[in-house]
Amino acid sequence: MKRNILLLIAFIFILISCKSPVSKDQSAKITDSTNTALTQQAKVDLNTDTSGNYDHILMINESSKALGVSKDIKEEMFETIDFRGKGAEERRQGVHLASKGDLKGAIQLFTKSIEALGHNPDAYFYRGKAKWDLKDFDGAEADFSKAIEQRSTQAPYYYYRGMMYMNQKRYAEAVEDFDSTVKRVPSYHDALNYKGVALAHLGNQEEAIKAYDKAIKVDPEGALAYFNKGTSLAGLSRFVEAEEALTKAININPKYEEAYVNRGNSRLMQNNIEGAWTDYSMALSLNSNSVDALYNSGFALMQLKRVDQACINWKKAVSLGHRLAQAQVDKHCK
């Protein structure tokens, strides 16, 4: 029983869409929450060089928006940019096109800006993001690296290259770039959180937890860092601590479906069957098609001797494509 449940305590990264933050598909990774505490856009100045010759970029802390802000992150970020210096008009127009999804048109304008001024790190940076979104990873990496070569002080260059490395599952390189981001802007908690995610992918849960703790220290109201911390703690079989961290995530955002599922897992591992069932039920009330809640709840229901309901949930999980549910149907449901 415990071995089966342990297989399910896996990271469900809400922000790690592994798509460029300028992607039109970003909204597909955002949950439906009305938690007003998380609807305040958190802006962080990632510019460590405020020379008038370069663009001034205020980045949006995505995890502050991830749980219920409707406005697209890419549009919000682009609206904050103060374009400066030679080639600024081409960059401004290119960023506008990129925010509307015309990436090829944007790349043409960024290239024009580079032609107007060879030492143009912001244009390389913007073009790199557009190429990434077009899945031209080699071209994007070359442009991000060129931007860093020309202006190594800028945190956004490292952060977005790190996010692209996450997309490519190049986790060790992502950690390096998130470290470079935080070195320049220690208050950027998204970089701390994603560093933890990358470390967790590398199997280093202890270091991942340290990164999440730093993100929490910077932003105590960040539900995502508590969620990821709880999931890493569960991965280390520290279920009591995992439940505490996941409870904090839920207290911040009472509509955090995935946090209820993982807290239910942690409670199940502590033999708190009723508590686990309550959490799975809450997750299903938020999303009746949550395959993880449907599958995991079957184990709690079996412990509660509610075999018929367990089979109903497992069969629905099968219909929704859960790869492990059929084995439980075959074993328990006649």
Image (cartoon, rainbow, N blue to C red):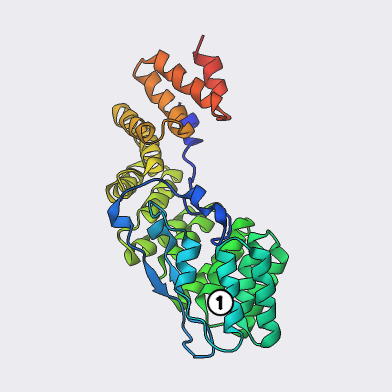
Q: Nearer the viewer, residue 130 or 75?
A: 75
The image quadrant of residue 90 is: bottom right
What is the count of numbered marks?
A: 1
For label 1, the crowd category at 10 Å Cα-Cα, with few meaning under 14, some 14 to 19 and many 20 or more, is many
Label 1 secondary element: helix
Tell me if residue 26 comes above or below residue 179 in the rendering. above
Q: Nearer the viewer, residue 74 or 259?
A: 74
Does residue 203 show up?
no
Does residue 236 show up?
yes
Residue 114 x/y as whole percent: 68, 82
**Residue at x-position 39% and y-position 70%:** 43
Residue 113 x/y as whole percent: 65, 81
Tell me if residue 42 comes above or below residue 124 in the rendering. above
Relative to 274, 257 lies left or right: right
Residue 272 x/y as whole percent: 31, 30
Relative to 298, 116 lies left or right: right
The image quadrant of residue 174 is: bottom right
**Residue at x-position 33% and y-position 47%:** 241
Position of the N terminus, as image quadrant, is top left
**Residue at x-position 60% and y-position 62%:** 164
Relative to 274, 152 lies left or right: right
Residue 28 x/y as whole percent: 51, 48
**Residue at x-position 39% and y-position 53%:** 224
In the image, farthest residue toward the bottom: 52
Q: Nearer the viewer, residue 291 or 299?
A: 291
Kind of residue indicated by mark 1 = Arg
Relative to 108, 154 lies left or right: left
Q: Which residue is mark 1?
A: 92
